[in-house]
Image: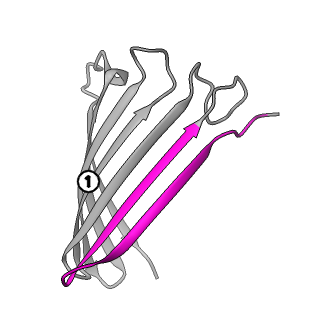
Amino acid sequence: DVDTRGWAIDGQMQGNAGHWPVGVYASYAEAKPSATNVFNTDPNKKKAWSILGEWGVIPDTMTLQLGYLDGDNGATAGSNKDQRLMTGVTWLTTQNLQLALWNTHSSGNAYDPKPASGGDNITSVMVFGAF
């Protein structure tokens, strides 16, 4: 048997600022520690909040994104703080094909010492198609 003890709350707002579409997304989640909790086997409670804003600079074609996460990964003190800053852009190339590019920079003592390969920055590309 395993526990699945954790909870999250999510809020979303979408609308227009002038003729530009905008979206704001926020969430908070936490999971209590337990040796059998699939969400957290670390010694302390895991918790995080995040906020993301999206602005349609070219309506129905291109958006810019900016997001921030502040979390505690449940590890022992001194290696538990996790902050991330995300910037991104999406481009709807055709009606059913979207290209997304984003970069996430991580900071906080969860990344100390930094791995020899770097480990605090990641850039991703996604091509999304739907029919």
Classified by dominant secondary structure, the portion drawn in magenta counts as strand
- The residue that appears at 40% across and 18% down in the rendered structure is 79
Seen from the viewer's position, the closer of residues 32 and 103 is 32
| Picture layout, residue 20 above or below residue 85 | below
Check disc 1 and report the residue beneath it: 102
Verify whether residue 3 appears in magenta: yes
Q: From this viewpoint, which residue is outermost toward the right?
A: 1
Horizontal placement of 125 versus 9: left or right?
left
| Picture layout, residue 19 above or below residue 64 | below
- The residue that appears at 56% across and 39% down in the rendered structure is 30
The stretch of residues the image draws in magenta is 2-30
Horizontal placement of 68 versus 33: left or right?
left
Residue 16 in percent (x, y) is at: 27, 79
Q: Secondary structure at mark 1?
A: strand
Seen from the viewer's position, the closer of residues 56 and 10 is 10
- The residue that appears at 37% across and 81% down in the rendered structure is 96
| Picture layout, residue 47 above or below residue 26 | above
Horizontal placement of 49 versus 52: left or right?
right
**Label 1, residues with CA under 10 Å away: few <14, some 14-19, many ≥20:** some
